[in-house]
Amino acid sequence: MVLARLIPYALVGLFAGYLYHTATQFEFHRRGSTLGPDFWPKLLLGLVIAICLYEIARIVLFRGRRGEASGVLQEMVEESEAKHGGGYVHVEARSPWVLVAGIALTAFYVWVILRLGFFLATLLYVFAFIALGGYRRWVVNGAVSLVGTLAMMFFFMKVVYVSLPIGEEPFAQLTFWLMRVMGIR
Amino acid sequence: MDVILAQLATGFVAVFAPANLGALTVGLVLGLLVAVLPGLTLVMGVVLALPFTYTMDVTAAIILLTAMYVSGTYAGAWTSILFRVPGEPIDVPLLWDGYAMARQGHAAKALGWTLVAAGVGGLTAATVMVLLAHPVARIALTFSTPEYFAIIFFGLASVASLGGGSLANALISLFAGLLIATVGVDDTYGAHRFTFGVRILSDGIDYLVVMVGAFGLGEVFTRMEQRFKSAPLESASAVSTRLPSLREMGAIKGTFARGTFLGIVVGLVPGAGATVASFLSYGIEAQYGRRKEQMGSGLPEGIVAPQTAATSSVGGAMIPLITMGIPGSGATAIILGAFLLHGLQPGPQVFETSSHIVYAVFASIFVAVVGMCLIGYFAVRYLVRVLELPEVIVSAYVIMCCILGAFAARNNITDVWLVVLFGVVGYLCERFRFPIAPLVLGVILGPLAETNFMTTMISFNNDWTIFFTRPISGTIMALAVGSLVYPVFRYLRRRARLAAT
């Protein structure tokens, strides 16, 4: 438990330390006694490291027995919820694999969009995302994915004039055909 | 005064131009929908709408986003009252009396009270905003870099100290945001900072990418891990709105006045927003109100206090945004982003250079409040039906909008990769309870903070005490330090009280 609370601060602190080291390597010509472009980032990184060290010390020394200073809103919410009852659903069950799959799917979509083109990549992505989210009405999913993707394509290319990826051959032919049908030049 | 009224009148004419009126209507409806849908927050909605405004005229773009901001503070109340599901964190206090009133069979009346409260709070705050903006801008014209840095420091300090979660985490988030803003080639020395040899990073990281990723994608990833499980909806009787009578309203005029005043003041504080206003107003009513013992049992005061404060905070938050270019809340941070995207820097000079845009935006807030109330009155029964939409479908299109928004800005796929990266960062922030608002505000205000700090240091021979010795900057710095120390003081006092008992 203590370790789990320590890890975020340790990682952030270490990363800040690495960035601090990087900031000492900035190349520039110092002008007299004026502060250089490294001053501001070093100041911020120093503060991040100090806070992380403080939090690590607090967790190690007091093992979470003592609370921590929190934002005023947090205290107001806690006090009010204690008095009147809360309004949020605190979901305990988490599905980390669904999350990992969702992130991977999104990253894959970004990678594939230049190859398949906006329409095909988005249609497949939206369908897969909705299925991954646990929605099992396949026909509705298919219809929503198709109609939504076509609507997005029409809006962005025809109304907002954004040049969406058309994809590589042979997928580009499908995009061109859809553009012709929609009257997009 | 005459000049202000004349310019406001011109602003109203501009608002009723078809393009601007269309943008306003779209903004109102989107704001209402975003506020109703659980999993979509007001700030997230405004972020998602921002890319759609790229090709719009600046006035229409700001009107659309401002209308979303106004109506987003209102519609979440419907789901709080009818289904016990707060659409926004702002609406949590509305559960306690609003839902209780609905359970007593007076749901229509509860909806009527929220409508009147939002209308009164919104219109009063808009009036105060118009009256105060010009004098504040005149004062701001006398400011130099130490004062500007002090104000930005105050804003950043208060977003950390007033927000949710631990103060240490909020500060880490804030510094991370300020650091992200330093990425790229430094303006003064031409030094490459944290670019790691990657060419695209030399141009810096666009705050839009951070906002869209952290607020939009991050939230969807968080909900995805929870498999989009929302609170089960309780059945509501036929949805309609019944307005309170003038006599009923007169009986709690003090609550209206207190809520509106608090909302404007909280909105004025850079970094605090509608959520703080709503909770604070309910808390004060529960502590000092005439019927404080009965709060939570379905009193109109328990609805009016948070709703007036939430909606009136919009007018308050627009004042520092327009007059000094400093956002007073998460949503105004994005509206500031929209101003900058369209090449307009809010600040005291904006009244000289672009007063027609400023007054059109001011006028649009009046029209938006009225429009919001009309749509709320006639369309509530239809708008709450969006709750029946499966959240996973909405989320799929939220991701779509995030990705397309990032791509549309510069037609660059690297920006899309950065959005996904910041989506993961946003998720990690949520997961490990590092608030996102300070991160985003840090990215937006970072360049301004650094420029004003460095210029002051150069102008005053590296004498950092100048921030504390000049009267205005000293006072603001003292307030900022006070806002940072206050949560620590509260914590120590609470610990001492616990130890004593």
Image: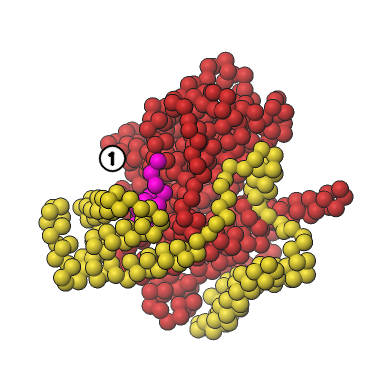
Could you tell me residue A158's position as x and y percent?
20, 52
Colour scheme in the image? by chain
User: Residue A38 versus residue B410: which sits nearer the camera?
Assistant: B410
* Residue B368 seen in the current view: no
User: Residue B36 versus residue A72: which sits nearer the camera?
Assistant: B36
User: Residue B150 versus residue A22: which sits nearer the camera?
Assistant: A22
Q: Is residue B177 above or below residue B129?
A: below
Q: Is residue A113 above or below residue B306?
A: below
Q: Element type at marker 1?
A: helix
Q: Residue at x 74, y 71 (%)?
A: A60
Q: Residues within 10 Å of mark 1 (few under 14, many from 20)?
A: some
Could you tell me residue B162's position as x and y percent?
63, 50
Q: Residue at x 41, y 75 (%)?
A: B202
Region in magenta: B388-400
The answer to whether A33 appears left or right of B141 in the picture is right
By secondary structure, the bulk of the magenta-drawn segment is best described as: helix
The answer to whether A174 appears left or right of A48 in the picture is left
The answer to whether B319 appears left or right of B282 in the picture is left
> Given the current orientation, which residue lies at the most extreme right position?
B500
User: Residue B17 versus residue B441: which sits nearer the camera?
Assistant: B441
Judging by the rendered image, the residue that carries numbered circle 1 is B19
Q: Residue at x 18, y 68 (%)?
A: A171
* Residue B229 seen in the current view: yes
Chain letter, colour yellow: A
Could you tell me residue B68's position as x and y percent?
42, 42
Q: Quadrant of residue B263?
A: top right
Disc 1 sits on a residue from what chain?
Answer: B
Chain letter, colour red: B
